[in-house]
Amino acid sequence: MDDGRGDERKGRRPHDGRPDDGRQADGSRSDGRYDSGKDVGRRPAGARPGDEPASSFRDAARRFEEPSPSLDDEWDEWLEPDAGAQRGEPGRSHPPGPETQTRAAERRRPPAPPGRRRRRATAGGALAAMLLGFFVAGLLDAKALETRISGEPLGASRSVALALLKPMTLLSGALQLDRPAQAIDTALGRSGGAHHTLAQAEQQKPLWPRPVTYAHPLRMYVAGDSMAQVFGSSLVNLAEKTNVIVGKLDYHVSTGLSRPDFFDWPQRLIDMIVEQKPDAAVMLFGANDAQAISVDGKVLKVGSAGWRQAYVQRVSQAMDILTKGGRRVYWVGNPIMRDPLYRSRISMMDHIYQDAARKHPGVTYIPTWSLFTDKKGSYADYLRDANGDLVLMRASDGIHLTRAGGDRMAQAVLDVIEKDWKIPQTQ
Amino acid sequence: MLFPTITFAIFFLLVYTASWLLMPRLRLWKWFIIAASYVFYGWWDWRFVLLLVAATFVNQALAAQIRRARGRSRVARAGRGWLIVAIVVNLAALGYFKYFDFFASSLDDLLGRFGLGAPLPLLRVVLPVGISFLVFRMLTYVVDIYCGELEPASTLDYGVYVAFFPYLLAGPIARAGEFLPQLRSPRDPHTVDAGRAFLLIIGGLAKKMLIADYLATHIVNGVFSSPQQYSSWETLVGIVAYSVQIYCDFSAYSDIAIGVALLLGFEIPVNFNAPYTARTIQDFWRRWHITLSSWLRDYLYIPLGGNRKGPGRTTVNLILTFLLGGLWHGAGWTFVLWGGMHGTGLALERRRADVRRRRGIPEPGATAGARALQRLGTFAFVTVAWVFFRADSIGAAFSVLWRLVAGLGSIGSAVTWPVIGLIALGIGIQYIPEAFMERLRLGMASIGWAGQGAVLAIALFLIQTLGPQGAAEFLYFKF
């Protein structure tokens, strides 16, 4: 909610000309020992009104001190409230914020009646309220907190947080305080819903090659992590311009193939195959996958042999699901990244995708690494587009793409798809 | 560190407790709050902290020079040279971090048209979060000292002003003259305005997590990234939803910042006052991002001559002020165009009012219906301007607007009841009478810590359960 609209405070201008009687804005009196934040804009002690240089800033300031009708008129012109703005609505009390309070309006305003004073709290009381609030909210929501923390990368801080949360979850369950959250989830239809099975997905038998026309378009399903957000929407936009492809973008931020406990992509792919009946699937993963994988309770560190084996297996599983029934799959590699360590990990994953694609008939690996390198083969934020203009391709994090970057990557992927389906090339 | 996260909640509980314990020893408290603010800011990138340290010492040194020059001399404009140095240094920092690449690539495009090569290297400078806000706050300090409005503060006080974490990332732009006096004596631990603070924080979280984030993911992002997939109706609802989203996002940040500062005993200025109830563009700018618009007025529009130099010059000043105000939001032509639209709109409004006054035509808005039409018209103008603010490029903005007429037909699946409901809610809360809000604040303040704790618990629980998983960044971080 907007607040402070009618909150009585002095105007924020340096001088508002009101006598200062030591009264607090809420009508209480300061005990003199402390300052309670009501001296906003008070004139500094050492300022001398007589000897300021004349300047336009000075003129501006002087206007606050010397109210004159003509200057007031002038102020009305831009940001000062004109009297008319409030005149029109007698029934609606909507005083502007302190910044825009006119002197006249302030003079008109009656002093706050003593009964309407806001009670102030002590610092300790406010702390007690916050602790109570956080604790009870934590109890009511322990389950969701646990789920959220479980989704963090495997490691010490996750384990500590989960251990600290354990008593909360137990207490919450014992007192049945987790009921309201369950009720809300059920009411919002978040309790998961029915999933489809791999057998159902297998029944879909997309035909390839086949002529694609406006009447029988190529149904393209695009999935991935946050990298797929811009890329995927660019791809869908460009593809739909051919009039023979319809696209469906399905990206989920912070997800990947490393952590099915956080987001179950294999299940998601099965569900989407059954529901969307795509002829082709475009996948872009990897940005969040450079993290430890847990297999049967054992935590495998990124880059280790065990990790590599587990990750290859997850990629293969996704490819198996997608190619069931003869679907064409275009597995998109990641572009070069700015950070050297991250870059090497992404490169490692790109190699895994490339190898896996070779072993899965129907899967085409599309590299995009060098689409985003400069002449020397290094990372570049700005690259020349088709018109020869220098364009910003990457987001400030050195990972994600700008719209221009997404378009560049999408065009490369679309070229492959068009060739594969014998669609006349668009450029 | 983001406000709506568990990390921040833990950080704040620790800082809050330590802050009030140290408050009686004000000097120690100042060191502490600087350290805490540096941790808060350095959470993204520790190098950003160096910027705060540099901003503190450089501006403090320049302020001392300005004060010295003013003190010795009775000549008008004494210290002007140092003031110019200060302005140039601050704007250069902003320019380097924010606009260098925009400038270099624009220059390259221009020269490319004449077949010339790239003259400047593109540095891709990492933008420190909230630097636009920081620079504008720095300027209030040196300018107010030059004008004799303010005495230079001690370096310690100034360090607190530079880094104070509630407003550090996205405003409100608290002026030096408003904040520094609050550092003179310890805040009173017996008069914490907790009721108002809690309401601000709860309201801010709800606006951000329940309204802004939902609209962003369910319609706005789609309409702006793939306009051709949406019908005319979806596009219309999508751009209105963006108006609501940006209000609920940005005002939420301001409200939480004000609430957090209040809990620590500090007042920082209000930033929003029901902007979509405005009946004119001028009125809108009194209600939207108030600390920015009043900054532009006092530190740009008036020094340019304001409206004292004739109608022609006033028009130029208005448009120039808003073009620069637009550019302040980001290095891109979309922002310049957005500012230009508002500047031109304001100038036209002024001209029309002048003509009406000369001819003796009464001011519009005499009837309730006329006022409603004025509100609708202002909202429509602001909403169309937001399309340019949101779009990736001017071309993209036009393709969104083009969909309003090109996608006629069925309504489309993106227009859902929750979307419509949240748009109505986001606008409706701005029409809540102030008297009601004040009653709410009085009520919240009177229920004591246990009652406040219970309200906090229920509100946090509902926001967390009803809201999407994970917090998205606030929009205004980019600026």
Image (cartoon, coloured by chain):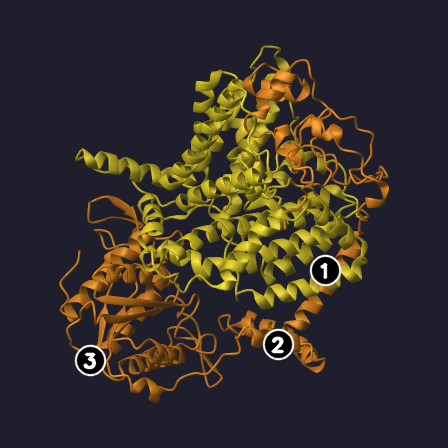
Chain colours: A orange, B yellow
Q: Which residue is mark 1?
A: A130
Whether discs 1 and 3 lie on one chain: the answer is yes
Corner quadrant of residue B146: top right
| Residue identified by numbered label 3 | A207
Q: CA distance from mark 1 to mark 3?
A: 61 Å
Going by the numbered disc 3, the residue's amino acid type is Leu
User: Disc 2 on helix, strand or loop?
Assistant: helix
Check the image and name the residue furthest to the bottom.
A199
- Amino acid at pointer 1: Met
Do callouts 2 and 3 mark residues in contact (Cβ within 8 Å)?
no
3D distance between C-alphas at marks 2 and 1: 25 Å
Looking at the image, is B304 positioned above or below residue A90?
Answer: above
Residue A17 vertical position relative to residue B167 in the rendered view, above or below: above
Q: Provide the residue designation for mark 2.
A: A183
Q: Is residue B449 above or below residue B438?
A: below
- Measuring from the top left, give residue B288's x and y in whole percent: 55, 40
Q: Mark 1: which secondary structure?
A: helix
A288, B465: nearer the viewer: B465
Towards the viewer: B334 or A371: B334
State which tag comes first along the sequence, 2 or 1: 1
* x 25%, y 75%: residue: A279
- Mark 1 or mark 3: which comes first in sequence? 1
Task: Work out whether residue B475 can be spotted.
Answer: yes
Q: Tell me if mark 2 has few (under 14), some (14-19) or many (20+) residues whose alpha carbon lies within 10 angstroms of its own.
A: few
Mark 2 falls within which chain? A
CB under 8 Å between callouts 2 and 1? Answer: no
Q: Are marks 2 and 3 on the same chain?
A: yes
Q: Is residue A35 above or below residue B462?
A: above
